[in-house]
Amino acid sequence: MANRFENHMQYFNNELISTVENKFNQKLTKNDRYFYGVSNGAGFGLHLLNSHPESIGTYLCFSTFGGDIQTNTWKPNVDYPKLYLEFGSEEPFFLKEDADFLKLKYKELNLLAEFNEFKGGHDYKIWNEKFIEIISKELAVE
């Protein structure tokens, strides 16, 4: 199927978010929305973060595969979303390379991000623990 990835991206950004918010009578802004993805889902999230930074305010991306992170255009003066990036010490080297690249970009653009290399590999049990840890902190009432 031609343009499958781009079609999915457009559907997610232009239809899915508004449909869900309308169905549940929500009047949300970028900062009210969170994205969570692991592996290929995290790669999709990082591509969405870069290509549509106005849609979602916080991204939790774990063990990111794909997303063309290093080939995407990162523009100055763009309000890119907050990023939590988690990856395992026993995962393929390119995950660390992408994380290092993102660390530099977020620092260069003076953006909010937290990067963590956990002990382990491509493991949903660790992702579940990290998700609970991060979202509990992120949504805590002060």
Image: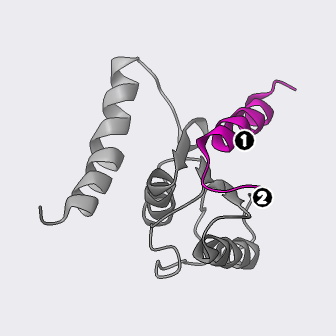
Q: Earlier in the sequence, mark 2 or mark 1?
A: 2
Mark 1: few/some/many CA within 10 Å (<14, 14-19, 20+) = some
| Residue 20 coordinates in the image, percent (x, y) | 36, 27
Q: Tell me the SS state at disc 2.
A: strand
Q: Residue at the location (27% across, 52% down)?
A: 8
Q: Which residue is mark 2?
A: 116
Considering only vertical position in the picture, is 21 above or below 36?
A: above
**How would you classify the magenta stretch by its main secondary structure?**
helix
Mark 2: few/some/many CA within 10 Å (<14, 14-19, 20+) = some
Task: Tell me the kind of residue under disc 1.
Answer: Lys
Q: Residue at the location (45% across, 67% down)?
A: 66
Q: Residue furthest right?
A: 142
Q: Looking at the rendering, which quadrant does residue 17 occupy? A: top left
Q: Which residues are magenta?
A: 119-142
For the residues labelled 2 and 1, the Cα–Cα distance comes to 10 Å
Considering only vertical position in the picture, is 105 above or below 67?
A: below
| Residue 123 coordinates in the image, percent (x, y) | 62, 48
- Membership of 126 in magenta stretch: yes
Proximity of marks 2 and 1: CB atoms separated by less than 8 Å? yes
Quadrant position of the C terminus in the picture: top right
Considering only vertical position in the picture, is 125 above or below 67?
A: above
| Residue 75 coordinates in the image, percent (x, y) | 55, 78
